[in-house]
Image: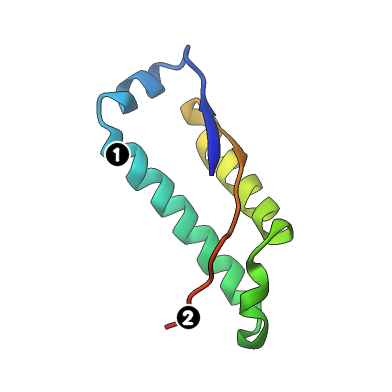
Amino acid sequence: MVLNVNKDSDYVYNLCMNVSELNQMLEAAITERVRNMVRAISSRKIQCIRGDEHAQTMVQHLRQVMSNKGINIKSVIITQVKLP
């Protein structure tokens, strides 16, 4: 994931004081989006979520979730898919 931070955002300043909170928010947003993506894809095609097409939907979701927090998601690459 590539992102940048709006230096004028008060929220970002507070997050910088507690980076673990930022990590938790990003992890929750990513987990939510991955669950939604997996539900929409058959198990035979799950390996195909790597790459650009599904990454773009992830970027759109993360931008929506994080934009009001002064964080702009630039890009995401899904590099690995592991099934239990």
Which residue does the image show at 58% across and 75% down from the upper left? 39
Looking at the rendered structure, the kind of residue marked 2 is Leu
Q: Residue 51 got which mark?
A: none
Which residue does the image show at 68% across and 73% down from the upper left? 48
Question: Quick one: SS at disc 2?
Answer: loop
How many C-alpha atoms fall within 10 Å of the one at disc 1: few (<14), some, or many (≥20)?
Answer: few
Residue 6 lies, with reference to residue 84, above or below; the image says above
Q: Which residue is mark 1?
A: 21
Q: Earlier in the sequence, mark 1 or mark 2?
A: 1
Residue 78 lies, with reference to residue 42, above or below; the image says above
Q: Residue 83 got which mark?
A: 2
Q: Is residue 6 left or right of residue 52?
A: left
Which residue does the image show at 40% across and 53% down from the upper left? 28
Front residue of 68 and 16:
16
Looking at the rendered structure, the kind of residue marked 1 is Glu
**Residue sticking out furthest to the right:** 53
How many C-alpha atoms fall within 10 Å of the one at disc 2: few (<14), some, or many (≥20)?
Answer: few
